[in-house]
Amino acid sequence: MGHIIHLPLSSAAIPNTVAALGAAERLMLMALRTWCADTRLSRDPLPHLLKTMARTNAPEAAFAVDHLMAVTTRTAAATVTIHPPHQDELAPEETSLLNAADLAQAGQAQLAERALRTTLLSAQDAACALVPLQVLGEAFAEASLFFHRTRALLAGLSQAGR
């Protein structure tokens, strides 16, 4: 017998403060913000990302974040706001990136691409950003770091198995 598990598809699932985020969302947000902070200071963000992601057993995620941010910051249709690392509120663009990563990890690649296309990037650029989002989602999953939708899916499967 099969079970239908409904997953929320809007970015409403993403809280608007850092304190309310799950571990995967906080790590990704820290990586995005660190990437931008290092870039603003004309520093290569990759060494810092590698160090951070290695501590969480997801070193491949560093390259995915670097690629994602390179695509996003170079091709966004408008200015992309990424807050400094210690700010508690989330910018709409940060929420959009977290939502897209959440969708990608949950196996909803088309929705992740559409989320980027409707909020930040052109269709072509959203397709380019999808690959690093999928790599990020896989690297996080291997390190047992799950975004909201995947956590909900796993909880639903766990309850269905009882």
Image (spheres, rainbow, N blue to C red):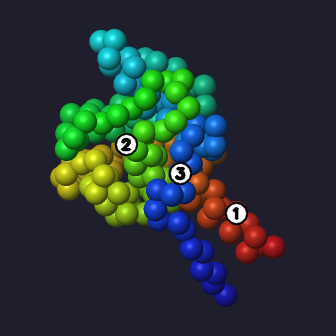
Check disc 2: other Cα within 10 Å, few if <14, some if 14-19, many if 20+: some
**Vertical arrangement, residue 50 with respect to residue 21, above or below:** above
Residue type (three-letter) at the residue carrying disc 2: Glu
Circle 1 — which element? helix
Sooner in the amino-acid sequence: mark 3 or mark 2: 3
Residue type (three-letter) at the residue carrying disc 1: Ala
Sooner in the amino-acid sequence: mark 1 or mark 3: 3
Marks 3,2: beta carbons within 8 A: no
**Image disc number at residue 4:** none
Instruction: Left or right? Give the position of 126 relative to 160.
Output: left
Q: Write the residue at 32% across / 17% down.
A: 40
User: Quarter of the image containing the C terminus?
Assistant: bottom right
Q: Which residue is mark 1?
A: 155
Q: CA distance from mark 3 to mark 2?
A: 12 Å
Q: Write the residue at 33% across / 48% down.
A: 131
Q: Residue 39 occupies which quadrant of the picture?
A: top left
- Answer whether residue 143 is visible to the viewer in this image: no
Q: Which residue is mark 3?
A: 14
Q: Which residue is mark 2?
A: 93
Return the x and y of residue 112 as percentages of the image width and height.
38, 57
Viewer-nearest of discs 2 and 1: 2
Q: Write the residue at 51% across / 42% down.
A: 139
